[in-house]
Amino acid sequence: MHDTTGGTLPARPPRRGGQGGPMRSSDPPHNTPAGVNPWMVLSATGLAVVLVMVNLGALNVALPSISRHFHAGAAVANWILLSFMLVNTVLILVFGQFADSFGRRNMYLLGIAVFTVVSLAIGFSPNIWWFLVFRVLQAAGGALVITNNTALLTDAFPESSLGKGLGLNVLIASAAQLIGPVVGGALAGSLGWQWVFWACVPVGLIAMVWGVLVLRRLPSTGSGRPIDWTGGGIIFVALSALIYALSEGGTLGWFNPSVLIGFALFVVLAPILVLTERRSPAPMFDFSLFRDRPYAMANVATFLNAFARVSVVLLASLFYQSVLHQGAFQAGYEVLPVTVGMLVASPIAGALSGRFTPRVLSTTGLGLSALGLILLMWALQPGLAYWLAGTGMTLVGFGSGLFLTPNTRSIMTSVPVDRRGFANGLRSMLQNMGQVLSTAASLTIITAGLPQRLQDAVYSGNVTNFTRTDVLRMVGGYRWAMAALLVATVIGMACSALRGKVAPALQKAD
């Protein structure tokens, strides 16, 4: 879900936010710290990527098993996914400034430790409420890992090989996504859903020990910039309120008091945040970076790509279980084409980065994803032609892989070194926000026109005693959800194309 990509471009001289001035083109280039082997750093960060990504992918397939175990209805089951996404999304941006200030290495290792310990505890949850509490704590650990992963690699690699390092990191993330649904289906189907989390413990322990050994030569101290506690608090409340309102609107009703309060809080706090951050000497949210159009458009495209891509795996796995009567393991196997496509595209994108601009590669990738979504809209039906659905999912994954590498490269090389934590945190937050809103919107669209018994069936996978009319109503919901993802992809293509040409200083390298 949090993809890391890069390239070989030198850093663009952007405007600094906060106290600093603009970065000059004469500033010294980034060099690898003495004694640091960047490829060993990649091996350490790759383990953490596997830890987080496999767990997230596995949970998508294990969701019906967890819902049945806790006898969770549609409203509560929705939060099995959204509780992690909401907290993870909100904390990523806040932790970005923590990493810049206190040191990326220490925050990263703390994240692995928290994620591992909570993964052990979550399997012993006595009820759904304890499960959700542990998921929130796990989300905090995951946010620390995600915020620092790409930034650590950018610190460790010299400019000449940064693209290769970040490209391989995407390859690792794609492989983890590929394995996740299969692992989730196998563990939930044979050993029980608890092992989806317990299996993370040995991986987390290895990642922790290896990280301590490998990352010890990276700088452990941060910039010492003061923490913008006011801005962080406003961001936390505003984003939490918005995500809650969008997530619960379809279930509780858009005019439910709690949903309206959520929207109202966001509307009130958004302008307050802008005013507060512009006056802060060390803002948590650096608005000055968005004066650069390529940087701004790349981030918008990041959000829309995540919105369009992430729910494809979830929707397809739920479709196979709720409509086609398949078990969790088979459903996990059927959705592999999405991550296979990303796995294949990542090295191709890295190879093409030296020949084509980020605008061309990223826009082309989104176009291929749009074509895949069109195929899926027609393929999702009771008499499913799997070759058509598999082709559609492969195109979605391949297009996303082609998009992510050049797009992330352009973001991470466009900011000053001491703002990489913020830049990666914002990028990851936008990806997570896309995932949260995509999951909430997709599930809302699917269940909006269904009676309660069919809404529960979407989550539990229980399809017994359903009429053909019931199934067709569910299929209609899935198709409308895919159509919404298609619209987001087309808008993302427009934003990617509007990012403009690269700066003259970068055209030769590009």
Image: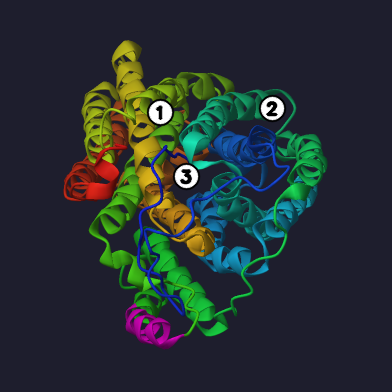
Q: Is residue 376 above or below residue 153?
A: above
Q: Viewer-proximal residue, 217 or 398? A: 217
Q: Viewer-proximal residue, 305 or 360? A: 360
Residue ID for mark 3:
456
Q: Nearer the viewer, mark 3 or mark 1?
A: 1
What amino acid is at disc 1?
Answer: Gly
Q: Which residues are magenta?
A: 267-280
Q: Quadrant of the C terminus?
A: top left
- Magenta span: helix, strand or loop, mainly? helix
First in sequence: mark 3 vs mark 1? 1
First in sequence: mark 2 vs mark 1? 2
- Asked whether residue 102 is drawn in magenta, I would say no
What amino acid is at disc 3?
Answer: Asp
Marks 2 and 1 sit apart, C-alpha to C-alpha, by 34 Å
Q: Quadrant of residue 388?
A: top left
Q: Is residue 166 above or below residue 297?
A: above
Marks 3 and 1 sit apart, C-alpha to C-alpha, by 43 Å
Q: Is residue 408 above or below residue 467?
A: below
Q: Is residue 314 visible?
A: yes
Residue ID for mark 1:
350
The picture places residue 5, in percent across and down from the top left corner, at 45, 39
Residue drawn at x 36%, y 47% as measured from the top left: 410
Q: Which mark is residue 187?
A: 2
Residue drawn at x 49%, y 56% as measured from the top left: 28
What amino acid is at disc 2?
Answer: Leu
For the residue carrying disc 1, how many other residues have a C-alpha within 10 Å: few (<14), some (14-19), or many (20+)? many
For the residue carrying disc 2, how many other residues have a C-alpha within 10 Å: few (<14), some (14-19), or many (20+)? many
> Which structural element holds mark 2?
helix
Residue drawn at x 27%, y 33% as measured from the top left: 361
Q: Are marks 2 and 3 in contact (CB under 8 Å)?
A: no
